Amino acid sequence: MIPVLTIDGPSGAGKGTVAKAVAVALGWHLLDSGALYRLTALAGIDRQYDLTDAELMAECASSLAVQFLVRDDALVIYLDGLDVTQRVRSEEAGMGASTVGALPSVRAALLDRQRTFRTAPGLVADGRDMGTVVFPDAQIKVFLTASPEARALRRQKQLIQMGESVSLPRLLEDIRVRDLRDSERAASPLKAADDAIMLDSTQMSIEQVVAAVLGAVETRS
Ligand code: DC
């Protein structure tokens, strides 16, 4: 059985950065499932679809023409032949992803695509339902959280680095809206798997979180 390590949690808890560092350290593949939801939302926006239309958005999800390429050690993402690397990380894509992620038809359309990432020697998968729905048999499950304030501050730093400026109160509000929608939706809501290791990164550096996750992998294996 190909090993899987799942990292679930709310937006801004540091899942993406931690998942990437852990995947590099273990030499395993990486699934950024949020990117698939973000790309589905962007495809819908570009086609001027209503993002709450279950049928149209499921069609977007199952027909996503996406390429993930590594160029100069950085990940480059193409959607329908266009470079969307920057756009995928925008607030527009994040909010849109949360909207389309609430649709069971979209989640079903993305399920098999996500499972194909499980290839040898192993997979680190980050998202909201990796340990509960997509890979319920994962050997190691981590649920990573942080206070909404800490997550808003981190997000603001990221956006400043990308040349975008959004006020802290606005980011905090976005985080609250997204947390609520992600955890209260009926389809695969954001919640920790019963067998998940809980980590609160509010007072931890990325390096400390990575070390804690790698420590858990060592203990379990
Ligand atoms: O992890 P992220 O911020 O890139 O995710 C963006 C949105 O996508 C998130 O608010 C909810 C949705 N999502 C989801 O519903 N299920 C996942 N496995 C990953 C993301």
Image: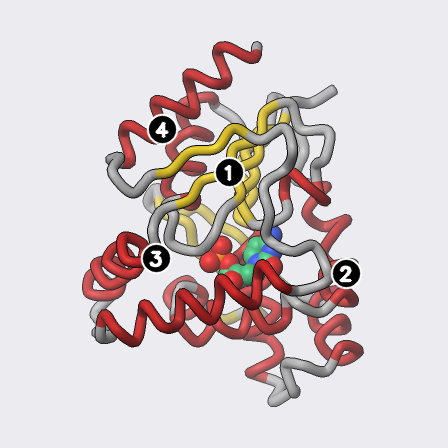
In the picture of the structure, the residue carrying the numbered disc 2 is 109
Q: Residues within 10 Å of mark 2 (few under 14, many from 20)?
A: some
Name the amino acid, label 1.
Answer: Phe
Give the alpha-carbon distance from disc 2 to disc 1, as whole Å: 24 Å
Q: Which mark is residue 148?
A: 3
Q: Position of residue 11 (x, y in %)?
A: 44, 56
Quadrant of picture, ligand 1? bottom right
- In the depicted view, which residue is nearer to us: 8 or 162? 8
**Mark 2 or 4 closer to N-term?**
2
Pair 2/1: label in front: 1
Q: Is residue 58 left or right of residue 199?
A: right
Name the amino acid, label 3.
Answer: Pro
Q: Which mark is residue 201?
A: none
**Placement of 52 over or under 2, stated as above or below:** below
Q: Residues within 10 Å of mark 4 (few under 14, many from 20)?
A: many
Name which quarter of the figure residue 46 lies in.
bottom right
Give the alpha-carbon distance from disc 3 to disc 1, as whole Å: 15 Å
Q: Position of residue 176 (x, y in %)?
A: 42, 67
- In the depicted view, which residue is nearer to us: 6 or 177? 177
**Mark 1 or 4 closer to N-term?**
1
Q: Which mark is residue 210?
A: 4
Q: Residues within 10 Å of mark 3 (few under 14, many from 20)?
A: many
Q: Residue at x 72, y 42 (%)?
A: 115
Q: Is residue 204 left or right of residue 109?
A: left
**Mark 4 or 3 closer to N-term?**
3
Pair 1/4: label in front: 1
Q: Is mark 4 within 8 Å of ligand 1?
A: no
Pair 2/3: label in front: 3
In the picture of the structure, the residue carrying the numbered disc 1 is 143
